[in-house]
Image (cartoon, grey):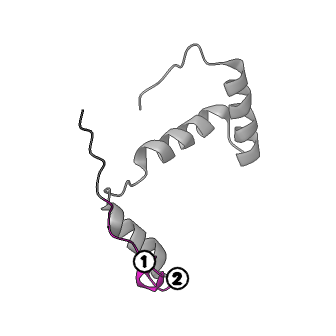
Amino acid sequence: MASLTIRNLDDSIKALLSIRAAHHGYSMEEEARQILRAALLEKTQPSQNLAKSIQKRFAELGGIDQIPTTPREPMREPPQFTP
């Protein structure tokens, strides 16, 4: 197993790590290992199409087809800038 030394760690971060370790019943070293494991080994999902993500989120609520649409007026003519 490899060793890692972290230099220039803010005292406030070290204190938070100590508190978190005590809360979980670990040493600071073990807590740091747990944090690194969770951050580096988590399974990342491939990014999805935005439209598919929206459909998936609203599927539980009946889908996006149930959302009423607002009637639109035809586009107006763009202004003419002639000197």
**Disc 1 on helix, strand or loop?**
loop
Between label 1 and label 2, give the one nearer the viewer.
1
Say which mark, if any, is on residue 28. Answer: none
- Residue closest to the far front: 83
Task: Please give the residue where the numbered disc 2 appears in the rendered image.
Answer: 61
Relative height, residue 43 to residue 65 (above, below):
above
Q: Which amino acid does label 1 sit on?
A: Pro
Q: Which of marks 1 and 2 is nearer the N terminus?
A: 2
**Is 49 colored magenta in this rendering?**
no
Q: Give the percent coordinates (x, y) of residue 38.
A: 50, 47
- Residue closest to the far top: 8
Q: Give the percent coordinates (x, y) of residue 57.
A: 46, 72
Q: Is residue 23 left or right of residue 9?
A: right
Q: Give the percent coordinates (x, y) of residue 19.
A: 76, 36
Q: Is residue 41 left or right of residue 31?
A: left
Q: How crowded is mark 2: few (under 14 residues within 10 Å), some or many (20 or more)?
A: few
Residue at x-position 66% and y-position 18% = 10
Q: Which quarter shows the N terminus?
A: top left
Q: What residue type is labelled 2?
A: Leu
Relative height, residue 62 to residue 55 (above, below):
below
Span colored in magenta: 61-76
Relative height, residue 60 to residue 53 (above, below):
below
Q: Residues within 10 Å of mark 1 (few under 14, many from 20)?
A: few
Q: Give the percent coordinates (x, y) of residue 80.
A: 26, 45
Q: Which quarter shows the C terminus?
A: top left
Task: Please give the residue where the numbered disc 1 appears in the rendered image.
Answer: 71
